[in-house]
Image (tube, rainbow, N blue to C red):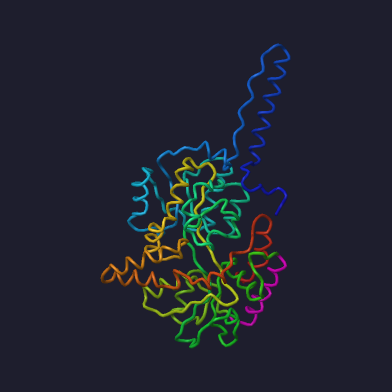
């Protein structure tokens, strides 16, 4: 990490140094005046660093939260928010304004760097390049760990120990997903267990890979027995070599974004890198029987994360809402609606109990959610999942230089 990288949790940035330098100048002027017979003004009271314990002690509940999230990523009636307001008296303005991490970052970063508020107290950002840039630039408020009671009590350990945010300093997961391998059983008539099947020459021209270089880069490293969470540039080059050999042999049909799931369904690809949630929803909505596995060598774990941007006007209210979603009943309501992997394992038994009392199509849906290995992964699968490589600071440019040519050529 670069020497000029802001230290985690200090809340001290370049403009703070300029502000303090200005205060020093004023103090010097005051002392000069005192030497001429004037009285010395009282020393200014120091401002606690943003996100420090002393800073959080000064925050007060304002009774409102502005929440920025992705489309269709909450229960449709917003009952989870209504229940929060009923329990706390805090109203919520909820906006589906985030379409993609990069475009959102491009929109908010200039505002944050001017020291201004973006108008939201909570935003949801996926771990990866933009998350790392926000941390490196000091554009997030370190969370008050004392206000994360439900999180620490109910969250699955895998969601409390994420390599890209040690100590949960800046974020709490909203929901997660796994990147593994999916295959169409109409064309592959065996169980897939190994990542090597994506390199199998028997499937030449029928393999789908992803354009997302964090996902694909991880798979290249896992193929070589490298743990992405502790990897560095030398490991990245080894992973890239494995991916280049696969590409040069003509094994991938192509590198895809969201359209990979349609190609797999139609049989244009037989086997593909895949996101767990896509496979579940495709099977649920289309009646298909696509299969999914976290390969024995490992797969990727990603999370969409709630965080507080610097300049937020209602940080204490925001902390209360973030922790609200770790109540098991609330987590279950959210999971029933969005079908992504919940951070709270107790949501499963609550959904199962609701399914037992339901009737008709509602019973069918709730039963599928409660019993799905794609929504509630097994413990053995969690043990094989890895976060993305550390791409903070200068490492981002190195990573992109190594992997971008593989998926863009």
Residue at the (68%, 59%) spot, across then down: 395
Q: Is residue 189 left or right of residue 135?
A: left
- Tell me: residue 65, above or below residue 36: below
Q: Is residue 160 left or right of residue 62?
A: right
Q: Magenta residues: mostly which secondary structure?
A: helix
Q: Which residues are magenta?
A: 233-251
Q: Position of residue 392 (x, y in %)?
A: 64, 56
- Frontmost residue, 192 versus 241: 192
Residue 27 location in percent, x, y?
Answer: 68, 24
Q: Residue at x 37, y 76 (%)?
A: 286
User: Percent from the top left, x then y, of residue 66?
Assistant: 43, 46
Q: Nearer the viewer, residue 103 or 352?
A: 352
Nearest to the observer: residue 375 or residue 389: 375
Residue at the farthest top position: 37
* Left or right: 343, with 18 as reference point: left
Residue 321 lies, in percent from the top left, at: 43, 49
Residue drawn at x 60%, y 72% is 219
Residue 10 in the figure: left or right of residue 354:
right
Q: Which residue, as the protein is rendered here, is positioned at the far front? A: 153
The C terminus - image quarter? bottom right
- In the rendered image, the residue lying farthest to the left is 359
> Is the N terminus in the top left, top right, bottom left or bottom right quadrant?
bottom right
The image quarter containing residue 350 is bottom left
Q: Is residue 130 magenta?
A: no
Q: For residue 248: magenta?
A: yes
């Amino acid at each position: 990490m670069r020497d000029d990288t802001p230290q985690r949790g200090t809340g001290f940035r370049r403009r703070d140094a300029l502000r303090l330098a200005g205060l020093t100048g004023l103090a010097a002027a005051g002392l000069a005046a005192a030497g001429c017979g004037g009285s010395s003004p009282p020393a200014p009271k120091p401002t606690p660093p943003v996100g420090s314990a002393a800073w959080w002690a000064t925050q007060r509940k304002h009774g409102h939260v502005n929440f920025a999230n992705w489309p269709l990523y909450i229960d449709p009636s917003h009952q989870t928010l209504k229940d929060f307001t009923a329990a706390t008296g805090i109203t919520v303005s909820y906006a589906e304004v985030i379409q993609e991490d990069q475009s959102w970052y491009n929109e908010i970063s200039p505002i944050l760097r001017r020291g201004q508020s973006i108008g939201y107290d909570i935003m949801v950002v996926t771990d990866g390049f933009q998350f790392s840039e926000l941390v490196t630039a000091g554009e997030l408020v370190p969370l008050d760990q004392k206000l994360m009671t439900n999180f620490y009590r109910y969250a699955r350990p895998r969601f409390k120990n994420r390599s890209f945010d040690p100590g949960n300093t800046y974020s709490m997961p909203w929901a997660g997903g796994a990147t593994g391998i999916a295959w169409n059983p109409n064309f592959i008539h065996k169980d897939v267990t190994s990542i090597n099947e994506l390199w199998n020459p028997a499937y030449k021209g029928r393999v789908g890979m992803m354009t997302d270089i964090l996902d694909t880069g991880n798979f290249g490293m896992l193929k070589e027995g490298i743990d992405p969470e502790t990897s560095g540039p030398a490991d990245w080059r080894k992973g890239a070599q494995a991916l280049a050999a696969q590409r040069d042999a003509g094994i991938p049909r192509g590198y895809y974004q969201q359209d990979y799931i349609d190609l797999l369904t139609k049989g244009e690809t037989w086997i593909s890198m895949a996101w767990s949630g896509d496979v579940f929803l495709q099977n649920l909505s289309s009646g298909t029987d696509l299969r999914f596995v976290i390969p024995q060598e490992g797969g990727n774990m990603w999370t969409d994360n709630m965080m507080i941007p610097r300049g937020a006007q209602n940080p204490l209210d925001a902390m209360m809402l973030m922790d609200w979603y770790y109540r098991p009943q609330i987590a279950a309501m959210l999971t029933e609606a969005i079908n992504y992997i919940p951070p709270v394992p107790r949501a499963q038994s609550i959904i199962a109990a609701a399914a037992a009392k339901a009737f008709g199509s509602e019973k069918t849906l709730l039963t599928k959610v409660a019993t799905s290995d794609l929504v509630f992964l097994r413990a053995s699968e969690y043990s094989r999942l890895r976060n993305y490589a550390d791409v903070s600071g200068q490492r981002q440019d190195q990573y992109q230089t190594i992997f971008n040519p593989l998926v863009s050529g």
